[in-house]
Amino acid sequence: MAINIIDINVKSLIPNPNNPRRDVGDVTELADSIKEQGLQQALVVTPDHEEHGERLFRVVIGHRRLAACKLAGLESVPCVVRELDAKTERELMLVENCQRSDLTPLEEADGYQGLLDLGAGVGELAAKTGRSESFVRGRLRIARIPADVRSGSEAFAQLSLSQLGDLAEFEAYPDMMAELASMAGTKNWDWKRGQLRSRVRVEAWQQSMRTALEALGLTVDVSASTWTTPEGYRFYDVWSGEPDEFEKWYGQWREKNPYGGPVIRFSERTVLCFPQLLPEEIAERDAKSERREREQAAFQEALAARKEFDRLAYTLRTDWIRKHATGFNGGQLRKANTRLSLLALTGTNLCDGLIAGAEWNNLDHVLDAYNALTTPLPVIEDGDVELYCEQNLTELHRRQNVEGAANRELLLILCAQMEAIIDHSTWAYKDDITIAQAYYQALEDLGYPISDEENKALKGEYLPEDDEAE
């Protein structure tokens, strides 16, 4: 292949529309260097088209250098002119840019996708760029993030590689992907991701459950509120489990409720089965029982929302602590350990602490939470096996005696104590929320980003209307 080096007027050089790097960045220092020493490395270009009798060339390698040359006031620059097919051209640009640290993951991903569209295979892309095939496949997943999702948030360009991977996870759910992308630049990213993952699991379960119901001649009623008892029916029985196990449960249920067909509804991953009332039961039904059922329905709806919030919040907190625990500095550890130690000893006041102190004694729950925060202990709870055993205690002592690890281990134990006592009922009592607020303050001191949903719960979002636990 013939290679020519010629001086070309900068006005005859045009940017490559397929360049993986979308932004050349600040070229001021490079322009100053070119003014002093001239351009030390020629650009690589390929013929493009003629315009007004003038031959134009498309830049393949050297977009930053071209921008710097224009800033330095050069009229022409030395260029290596190469005749290139589309695939080779893209390969050159991708390989060149992959060697630079300032190429963003999304730009690299789009570069791989462009070559894939021209017929390159994953193995070939990996060999050309020196990456592993799994790395290339990961980038290609990112490249499939639609343009409307990318443009839907001004902060999209700030997303990290892991956050782009989170988006790619919802490739089969475009609406969810856009919903998650709208959280870019906020503290709510992890919360929304957990919420959407839960929604995906629920939708998959419900779809499988519908198939199992249809096989029994049953359909899901979506005409009314999940928790409202239909007219002429008794309050529901509930079943949660795998769809392929439902038929056995339903057969046993029908033996107890042989009359009439039931109304079937979903609540997340639960089937609600409303049996028909017997004639004598209908006659006995009065306003008082109806009111009681409405109150029970309201209670169940509030309880379900609180349980789902608590599950997501627990996952978010423990995942964050596990990911960041080894990165906390000495000052952060001392501040958090002081706050949490006082909380463990006295609560939000001395009386609260003495009352709550009894709950800290459930050591199996504490160690179970500890396993969620860090590398699990050797003996994992299974049936009647207790976590609070000699082997686990020996391992805890060993970890605490590792040089420089004592403060971190103390933090993990203190956080595990808090995680062991916070559950869905915490959010229904003002006093318990006060404890949770103190815990969240310690986490925030460590850098934990409290989502809007968690802030609402800390302010009493899930308190019963009468300020008493249901």
Image (spheres, rainbow, N blue to C red):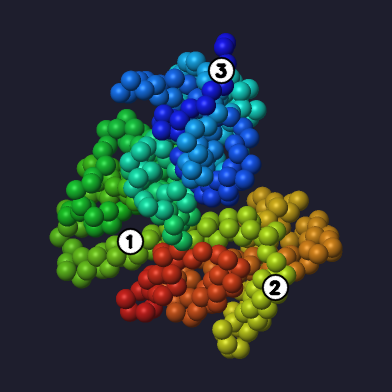
Q: Where residue 282 sits in the image (x, y, percent)? A: 17, 57
Cα separation, mark 3 vs mark 2, equals: 61 Å
Q: Secondary structure at mark 1?
A: helix
Sequence-wise, the earlier of marks 2 and 1 is 1
Q: Disc 2 to disc 1, how far (Cα)?
A: 43 Å
**Circle on res. 50:** none
Compared across the picture, whether 446 is left or right of 210 comes to right
Quarter of the view holding residue 306: bottom left
Type of residue at label 1? Glu
Q: Which residue is mark 2?
A: 331
Residue at coordinates 55% horizontally, 74% vertically from top-left?
441
Q: Is residue 71 above or below residue 464?
A: above
Quarter of the image with the N terminus is top right
Circle 3: residue type: Asn
Circle 2/circle 1 CB separation < 8 Å: no
At which x and y percent is residue 205?
40, 40
Q: Residue at x 66, y 50 (%)?
A: 382
The residue carrying pointer 1 sits among few (fewer than 14), some (14 to 19) or many (20 or more) residues within 10 Å by Cα, namely some
Q: Furthest-top residue in view?
A: 1
Mark 2 residue type: Gly
According to the image, label 3 marks what residue? 4
